[in-house]
Image: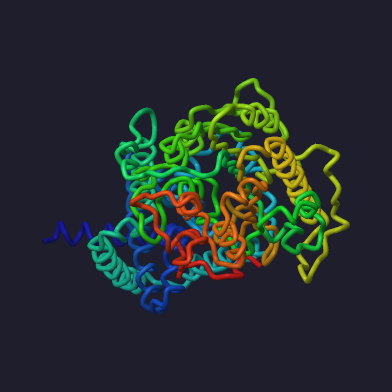
Amino acid sequence: METIKNLLNKIGLLLYQHRATTMLLTMIGWLGSVDIYHKLLQDGHSMPLQTIKWASIALLFALLLTLLIGCKNKVIKVIGILVSILYASLAIINAISYQFWGFGISCRMFTIIMESNERESGEFINHTIGNFASIDFITNLAIFLAIAALLIWSVKKLCKEKPYLILVGIIGLIGVVASGLQLQNTTEKKNVNILLRSLIDYRRTHQNLNSTSDNNWGVDENKLLESLNGDYVIDNVVIVIGESASRNHHSIYGYDLNTTPKLQEKSDELVIFNDAISSYSTTSESMKMFFSYKNYSTHKGEWYEYPSVPSIFSHLGFKTYWISNQEKMGHFGGCEDYFSSKCDSSAFVGMLFSGDNLQEKYDEALLPELSKIMKNPGKKLVVLHLMGSHGEYYRRYPKEFARFTEKEIADRGRDYLTRSKKKTIAEYENSILYSDYIVSNIIDTIKQYNQQKTMMIYFSDHGEELYEKRDFAGHSNGYVDIPFIIWTNEATRLQLGEKYKEITQSIDDPISIENLPDFLLGISDIKYQMYDPTLDFTSPSYRLEKRFADDAVYIKGQCD
């Protein structure tokens, strides 16, 4: 009994002597749960209850780490310091990610990192650095540091040993109970601590990526497509995927700078949809939705468990082509590699992967490849993936398209807009202007084959935040408002008849491009067990009650 009492006294003395370390680690632990805590409050959970819960869990882990750091055994002490450094790093990354992009460390983050390549990572870092100087970030950082400093000073200077140990003991016991209850919840147990969350989500992400690498691609698509039958009435389907192109920055949608003059000249030939969104604000996640039959409404599970759009068209007798100005592979593969491999032919006109000797090219490099393909006989599905408005916007267009400068960018009450930030916005507008030129030239290219029934669909994978509501630019959670435009030649319009009329009557319908496969089959009345007329926006049965963006219900106007 005396031995236990002496041990408890030693532990108590150690914890008291290192109380400043405990408080610092508690604040760090809070950063590691800030996204979970904030989401629970947004969902209507009790603020006092959630505050006690996450503060007690943060303190519990801080006490455990303090014991390791304060141990006299050098090996244990070093382990404690290393784990604490890792803990702090993960917590800081979690908080910054949530502040900037609306999500913390998760499968989503790991997927983005693992499917990115060296060039993308470098551009992302360069593009993001400026956001650290934003007013919001500096304000939040100052608040956190002030609270942390006040807490550490108060505990260090004002707390006596016995009251301190009683208080942290009570809170620590609450943390034990809260952690135990959290671990009992199968869906939420990983959120008990940032270390556990990171370990579980990294493992899950790695398993998912392994499922789509090499030849282990999940399912037999041929079996899934057995019920697919019918004669596709269009000869050529050309799908043009833009990159980071926000609908709100296109003059064809009413933006005050003339960023889409070429498409506006062709407006009589276009069907321009006014309310289209993507499912995610990142390329990989968005593409997995619109190029597979997975959706939020009816087809859940993993995206690779469903047939891909290229495989669907191959089954219908089309020759399928993939032409991309983006890189083929990320660090651990990716959906670009996956979907392009489903095509009969693929061409990557720029870098195949980071580090090769091919030069980075502008999107006009796609046009000669398209011309070659259009000369081929037979029915064709052609996918063109633009570099568009990716990352460092000034790198996306030739100098002759640098028409907009910071002088054209209006403040509109945004006091945080410096000259440098206006320059960034202007560079983004120039990238949209160049994409307008590219899409217009794609139309002109396929127009040369008017004897063939051809449809072109242009949309972006997601939008982009450009200092609209806060001092931030880049990919951002919920920024999914995108252009969605269809061009058809006269032969196609005649062939489609009433169906074309239904397309034109759908321009104001709420659309999510995750339902692209249903639209593509519906316009030609192809029979398929997975086809759902309620998700085909040209069908009289169409009713999309909810749209989702970044795993949350989309609210119209949230990107304005």
Query: Which residue is found at the position 28% from the left and 58% from the top?
Result: 11
Query: Which residue is found at the position 73% from the left and 34% from the top?
Result: 364
> In the rendered view, would you say 512 is above or below 40?
above
Q: Nearer the viewer, residue 496 or 365?
A: 496
Q: Nearer the viewer, residue 275 or 477?
A: 275
Is 249 left, or right, of 190 in this rendering? Answer: right
Could you tell me if residue 548 is visible in this image? yes
Tell me residue 254's x, y (percent): 75, 64
Q: Quadrant of residue 162?
A: bottom left
**Quarter in which the N terminus is drawn:** bottom left
Tell me residue 453's x, y (percent): 60, 42
> In the rendered view, would you say 163 is above or below 447?
below
Residue found at the very far right of the displayed protein: 407
Q: Quadrant of residue 307?
A: top left
Q: Nearer the viewer, residue 54 or 412?
A: 412
> In the rendered view, would you say 75 is above or below 528?
above
**Quarter in which the C terminus is drawn:** bottom right
What is the image's colouring?
rainbow
> In the rendered view, would you say 213 is above or below 475?
above
Tell me residue 67's x, y (percent): 32, 53
Residue found at the very far left of the displayed protein: 1
Could you tell me if residue 479 is visible in this image? no
Q: Quadrant of residue 230?
A: top left
Residue found at the very far top of the displayed protein: 357
Tell me residue 378's x, y (percent): 54, 31
